[in-house]
Image: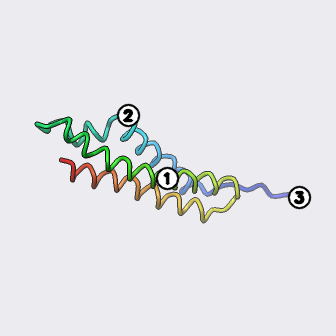
Amino acid sequence: MTRTWVPPAIPTVASLLLAALWGLSVFGGWGTEAFCSGAESSPACADRIASAILLSAVIALLAAASTAAGWLTHRSALLEVAVGAWVLAVGVLFVGGVVAQ
């Protein structure tokens, strides 16, 4: 009898939710809307937040790779690393947005 690998539910769901939050903040414009909507120099604020998005995207790429590797290699430790990387990517985006204001 062969056992099938079942990924841990909590890290998997956390990764998916954090990835969705990050994606909507970056590609859906939530980050720019949240931090630059009331600024008098909105284009300048959007330029400043773009650098935070770039740094956050590098971390998100690592998080996505860790998520995929965890699923493909059946290693739950990689899924936990992925959750930490997604939290870091969202945190960098948030701190960058606050600084951009």
Q: In this view, does 22 lie to the left or right of 30?
A: right
Q: Which residue is drawn at 47% across and 46% down?
A: 19
Q: Nearer the viewer, residue 100 or 69?
A: 100
Tell me the CA gap for discs 2 and 1: 20 Å
Q: Which element carries disc 2, helix, strand or loop?
A: loop
Q: Name the residue under label 1.
A: 14
| Disc 3 secondary structure class | loop
- The residue under the point 89% across, 58% down is 1
Q: Do the residues labelled 2 and 3 touch (CB within 8 Å)?
A: no
Residue 29 in picture, x, y percent from top left? 33, 35
Question: Along the horizontal axis of the image, is 69 left or right of 62?
Answer: right
Label 3 or label 1, whichever comes before in sequence order: 3
Image location of residue 62, percent across then percent down: 52, 55
**Residue drawn at the location 30% of the way across and 52% of the way down:** 94
Residue 30: x %, y % from top left: 32, 37
Spot occupied by residue 85 in the image (x, y as percentages of width and height): 47, 59
Return the residue at label 2: 28
Q: Going 63% across and 62% down the picture, which residue do you hit? A: 76
- Front residue of 41/31: it is 41
Amino acid type shown at disc 1: Ala
Q: Residue reaching furthest right? A: 1
Q: Pointer 3: residues within 10 angstroms few (<14), some, or many (20+)? A: few
Q: Residues within 10 Å of mark 2 (few under 14, many from 20)?
A: few
Say which residue label 3 marks: 1
